[in-house]
């Protein structure tokens, strides 16, 4: 199921025409990839608390400029996709190919915020965010600054 989704997403992004539909499909695919990674980080410690779910919803809504209903729909679909997730590679490669350095760093910043959403950083969450940052080719220094910022914001 994930393979078919990724194939459709890749086809939509690779399509040669620059129509509005193609652009919308590309944006939807990038939002989905980022949301799946966000859900995966929230679940990395094997506990998906309400505070983490609420934080994912807030961040998705704000980052992607969605309505509350659109954010909830995206998070629910991403949660379903994350259930069957066996590899981060396809999602991170999609983001790596289509985002610039600043956008990739913003995604990593969101992931750190989710990791700290429950007030503590679990070793599995830490490891997963670092792994994703490596796959997105975000520099270690920037990753550590983003982590520090998220930790400070979490209080």
Image: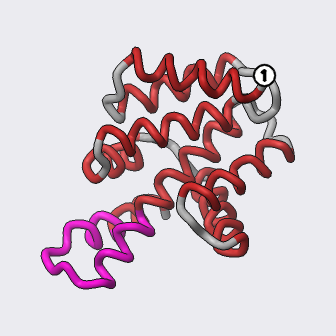
Q: Quadrant of the C terminus?
A: top right
- Taking the spot 74% from the left edge, 47% from the top edge, the residue there is 55
In front: 78, or 119?
Answer: 119
Image coloring type? secondary structure
- On the image, numbered disc 1 is attached to which residue? 120
Name, please, the residue furthest toward the right.
50
Find out whether residue 11 is within the magenta segment: yes
Horizontal and vertical percent position of residue 135: 36, 32
In front: 14, or 143?
Answer: 143
Q: Secondary structure at mark 1?
A: loop
Figure quadrant of residue 12:
bottom left
Horizontal and vertical percent position of residue 17: 16, 80
Horizontal and vertical percent position of residue 147: 57, 22
- Left or right of 13? Residue 146 is right
Q: Give the dominant element type of the magenta stretch: helix, strand or loop.
A: helix
Horizontal and vertical percent position of residue 122: 72, 20
- Left or right of 48? Residue 81 is left
Figure quadrant of residue 81:
bottom right
- Taking the spot 65% from the left edge, 35% from the top edge, the residue there is 113
Mark 1: few, some, or many residues within 10 Å (few <14, many ≥20)? few
Q: Which residues are magenta?
A: 8-29
- Taking the spot 61% from the left edge, 66% from the top edge, the residue there is 74
In front: 126, or 18?
Answer: 18
| Vertical order, 147 against 19 (above or below) | above
Figure quadrant of residue 153:
top right
Find out whether residue 87 is within the magenta segment: no
């Amino acid at each position: 199921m994930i393979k078919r989704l990724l194939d459709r997403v890749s086809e939509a992004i690779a399509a040669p025409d620059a129509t509005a539909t193609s652009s919308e499909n590309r944006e939807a695919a990038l939002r989905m990839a980022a949301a799946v990674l966000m859900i995966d980080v929230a679940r990395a410690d094997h506990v998906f608390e309400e505070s983490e779910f609420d934080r994912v919803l807030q961040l998705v809504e704000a980052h992607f400029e969605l309505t509350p209903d659109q954010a909830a729909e995206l998070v629910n679909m991403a949660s379903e996709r994350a259930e069957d997730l066996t590899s981060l590679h396809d999602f991170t490669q999609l983001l790596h190919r289509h985002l610039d350095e600043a956008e990739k760093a913003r995604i990593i910043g969101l992931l750190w915020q989710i990791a700290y959403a429950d007030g503590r950083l679990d070793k599995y969450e830490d490891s997963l965010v670092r792994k994703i940052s490596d796959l997105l080719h975000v520099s270690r220094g920037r990753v550590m600054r983003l982590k520090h910022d998220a930790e400070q914001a979490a209080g």
